[in-house]
Image (tube, helix red, strand yellow):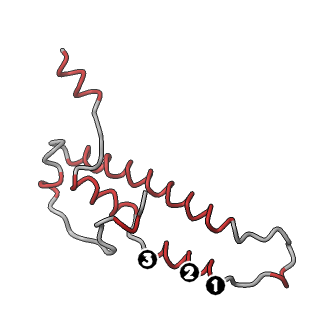
């Protein structure tokens, strides 16, 4: 996922919960969907950051040799400036990019 191309705001935005839960008809179900997607995004972002920072890892335990790498600082700043995973997940949900289903509701429709 390219986090740079997301339309999510970088700060908190007040949302109308009634508009947000129109698709599901349930506020709690909507929050659960957004929360699960936010967890997926957070794990993916953490893995990406870990992979990029692993390149700079030093396997020596000598404290005298530890120094700040400019590229490592820039990578860290980039990830700090990104929108939070909950904001990205909420924007994806609003744009209709999140796939979800409720097996309980599908079971009720079949009966």
**Tally of numbered tags:** 3
Contact (CB < 8 A) between labels 1 and 3? no
* Label 3 to label 2: alpha-carbon separation: 11 Å
Q: Quadrant of residue 18?
A: bottom left
Q: In this view, does 82 lie above or below 67?
A: above
- The residue that label 3 is drawn on is 81
* Label 1 to label 2: alpha-carbon separation: 6 Å
- The quarter of the rendered structure image containing the C terminus is top left
Q: In this view, does 53 lie above or below 72?
A: above
Q: Quadrant of residue 103?
A: top left
- The residue that label 1 is drawn on is 70
**Numbered label attached to residue 74:** 2
- Residue at screen point 21% across, 48% down: 27
- The quarter of the rendered structure image containing the N terminus is bottom left
| Dot 2 alpha-carbon crowd within 10 angstroms: few under 14, some 14 to 19, many 20 or more | few
- Residue at screen point 50% across, 55% down: 44
Q: Where is residue 19 in the image (x, y as percent from the top left)?
A: 12, 55
Q: Where is residue 77 in the image (x, y as percent from the top left)?
A: 51, 79
| Dot 1 alpha-carbon crowd within 10 angstroms: few under 14, some 14 to 19, many 20 or more | few
Front-most of residues 53 and 39: 53
């Amino acid at each position: 996922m390219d986090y740079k191309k997301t339309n999510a705001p970088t700060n908190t935005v007040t949302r109308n919960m009634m508009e947000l839960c129109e698709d599901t008809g349930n506020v709690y179900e909507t929050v659960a969907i957004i929360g699960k997607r936010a967890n997926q995004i957070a794990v993916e972002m953490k893995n990406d950051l870990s992979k990029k920072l692993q390149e700079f890892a030093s396997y020596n335990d000598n404290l005298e040799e530890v120094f700040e790498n400019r590229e490592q600082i820039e990578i860290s700043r980039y990830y700090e400036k990104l929108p939070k995973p909950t904001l990205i997940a909420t924007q994806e949900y609003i744009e209709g990019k999140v796939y979800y289903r409720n097996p309980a509701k599908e079971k009720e429709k079949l009966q």
